[in-house]
Image (cartoon, rainbow, N blue to C red):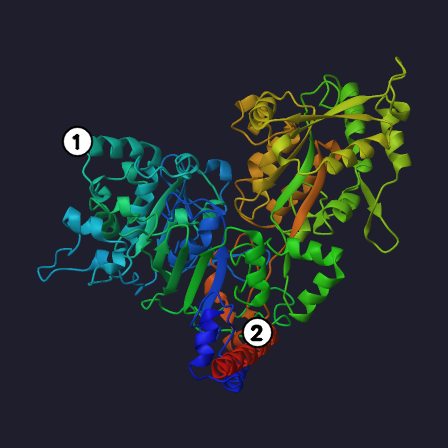
Amino acid sequence: MRALFHFVRGGLSVRAALCAAAAVAALFSAGCGPVNSPRPGTDGSENTLYSPFSGRSPKTLDPAASYSSDETAYTYSIYEPPYRYHYLKRPYEVVPLAAESVASPRYFDRSGRPLPSGADPASVAESRYSITIRKGILFAPHPCFAKAPDGTLLYSKLPEEKAASLGSPLELPERGTRELTAEDYVYAIKRLASPRTVSPAFSSLSSRIIGLAELRNEIRAFDERSGHPPFLDLRKVPFPKQGVYADGPRTLVIRVKGKYPQFRDWLTMTFFSPVPWEAEAFYSNPGFRENSIGLAWWPVGTGPYMMEDYKENRLHSMTRNPNYRGDPYPCEGEEGDREKGFLGDCGKPTPFIDRIVFTLEKESIPLRTKFLQGYYDSPAIDRSDVGQGFLVEAADSPDRAREYAEKKIRFPRSTDLSNGYLGFNMLDPVVGAGRTTEEAARHRALRQAVSIAVDWEEQIAIFQKGQAVPLMGPVPPGISPRFARMNPVVYKEGPDGKPVRRTLEEARRLLALAGYPGGRDPRTGRPLVLSLDYLSAASGSRSLLDWYQKQFAKLGIQLEIRATDYNRFQDKMNRGAAQIFLWGWLADYPDPENFLALLYGPHSKAVTGGSGENAANYRSKEFDRMFDRMKLLDDGPEKDRLVDEMIRIVQEDAPWGFGTAPRTAAAYHQWVLNAKPSSMVRNSLQYLRLDTALRAEKIREWNRPVWWPLLLLAGAVAAAAALLLRTVRRNAGRSAFSRRGE
């Protein structure tokens, strides 16, 4: 009050104060942009894509070690393996990336003699891939390539105090580049075997690439002989048996044991990205690692983007690689892509976006709020499933559905390359394979009856809100619709030609054939009791487990639920001790072989001590024989025929209740164009385009400042000031009168 009194006495009238308040209010109402923007100084018109990340920063961006989905947005934007998947085509098609073309392997027998392309796969001892690298591809500008006047690398041996003082390699003033060569791929493949790298791909690839297993021992011995130097120059370690080598500057040769058609899919992964030796030499400077400077944080590649800023657990940004060649946007896709606008940028050079910024959001509510305000272009630009939660909310809340519709948020869907199923342990004495022909037939009838009774369509409707499709076999429809034909054991064709689940009466007849009429053992009169093991940490909902019990109860079967912690669950599965269980699989590559391998007898968990992925311990001589041939075949009619036959066998044997495949849904604002989500196509960021003018307009529209509360407050303050002024003047007048009276 005392301050206000002096302010008023200082000569500013109440009228002047009101005028000033009105002028300030008018200024803000005119609008200088949203005042709630998390990025002051920007209005959405910049050609930058914004997306959050949650949790922590990626563990590693080293292409030899990276194998986590939250790392792919960076690694597949910065690095270029020889091949990639076509951005738009489904089923997925392998196309060249850094390579000039997708090379057909040459085959050789055990004596090293060439074989024709159509040779019997069993006679192939070696597949040799000769991959020609495109001419003129340049690495992104980086200090590791900077050279001194004498031609030596400028920064390969920095003083330790200088290296330790840097927060980013880009703080060094000089940068350079050079052309990509086949030797860069050879060096990268050697790194897979290096004990210093610890690559998750080594165990799989060492059994395929000739000499790779031996290379690990060679590198370890070389490291010891060299005294464990900071920079372990793998160029000096010959590749054993010439398993991988450069045949000239632009031809990469990889020798693979036997025939392995799926190796083509491996060549789309960042494990086969080129790594320049100069980068390893540069990042070996003492003092760098302590400041998070290395390939794990600052990749060096030839792709459309390069790392611009890396603030651990805060912010990561990539900017356009100025040396990128501008790979054209595809002009072909699947049916319907043209109508959806996916072909409008046909032939235009990519990338379209100048900069991509990922910001940490620790809490889901601020993340969601900023997305709905338009400050994030997607709640997770690198995930194809983030829209599912929005769709579930829209189904439950008309207000949410209306908001999403009004803002024209898009939730493009796709069928994920994964499955979730109810497995029967084929070693179990009740639900398993059986010891005799008669027992096998009865147990098969029991599994078939349960497969009919468990209504996956109902589960999808209740628990997944329609965001999944029922499976007809082990191969999800996302691999190819032709492998998702109706399962005749569980379904029959309806009047409209669509599959209709068989009736409970049919299931009960099968149950009677199994020896349990009405779900009871006729010898004892007791109900059949089966047990379901599940991983307690992954259950999610007691109501879902109750639902499973009700499905079995429809046949009179009592289902006992056994919650198990992770270690005990894994142990029971590895020993083949569970009876019925919940399991699933996410594709490593889009080939039916990747899913049919889950039922291959030699991969049985109980047989392999847990290293195999046949969790049901299923074994069929006929299936295994077909699988052994199918896995060696190239795509074509013979492979398709064998896949169909194998699916028919397991449909009849019913080692799984085939369950569901999730329908994923991404989430994008209306100004994000060309967004076609996929769990397989990981280099998608270069194809996205932003309508930045529309984004800026919508951000202004959705974030208009609301000033009337401040005006109301200003009015209240002015009224209080006026009242105070009158009081002061009245008191002043009384004081003057008193003084005159004295």
In this rendering, the answer to whether 289 lies above or below 216 is below
Q: Position of residue 454 (x, y in %)?
A: 79, 37
Residue at the image position 20 percent from the left and 50 percent from the top:
163
Residue at the image position 70 percent from the left and 38 percent from the top:
541
- Of residues 515 and 182, the one drawn nearer to the viewer in this rendering: 515
How many numbered circles does the render carry? Answer: 2
| Amino acid type, mark 2 | Leu
Q: Position of residue 654 (x, y in %)?
A: 73, 33
> As drawn, which residue projects farthest toward the left?
150
Mark closer to the observer (1, 2): 2
**Residue 477 showing in the rendered view:** no
Q: Are marks 1 and 2 in contact (CB under 8 Å)?
A: no
Instruction: Quickly name the residue at label 1.
Output: 225
**Residue 220 showing in the rendered view:** yes
Instruction: Quickly name the residue at label 2.
Output: 710
- Of residues 534 and 19, the one drawn nearer to the viewer in this rendering: 19
**Callout 1: SS:** helix
Q: Position of residue 712 (x, y in %)?
A: 61, 75
| Amino acid type, mark 1 | Arg
- Residue 90, by quadrant, is bottom right
Residue at the image position 51 percent from the left and 60 percent from the top:
86
Lateral position of residue 308 relative to residue 149, left or right? right
In this rendering, the answer to whether 305 lies above or below 261 is below
> As drawn, which residue projects farthest toward the front?
742
**Callout 2: SS:** helix
Badge 2 local density, few (<14 within 10 Å), some, or many (20+)? few
Quick one: label 1 or label 2, which is nearer the N terminus?
1
What distance separates the C-alpha of mark 1 from that of mark 2? Answer: 75 Å
Q: Position of residue 693 (x, y in %)?
A: 52, 78
In this rendering, the answer to whether 558 lies above or below 257 is above
- Of residues 357 and 234, the one drawn nearer to the viewer in this rendering: 357
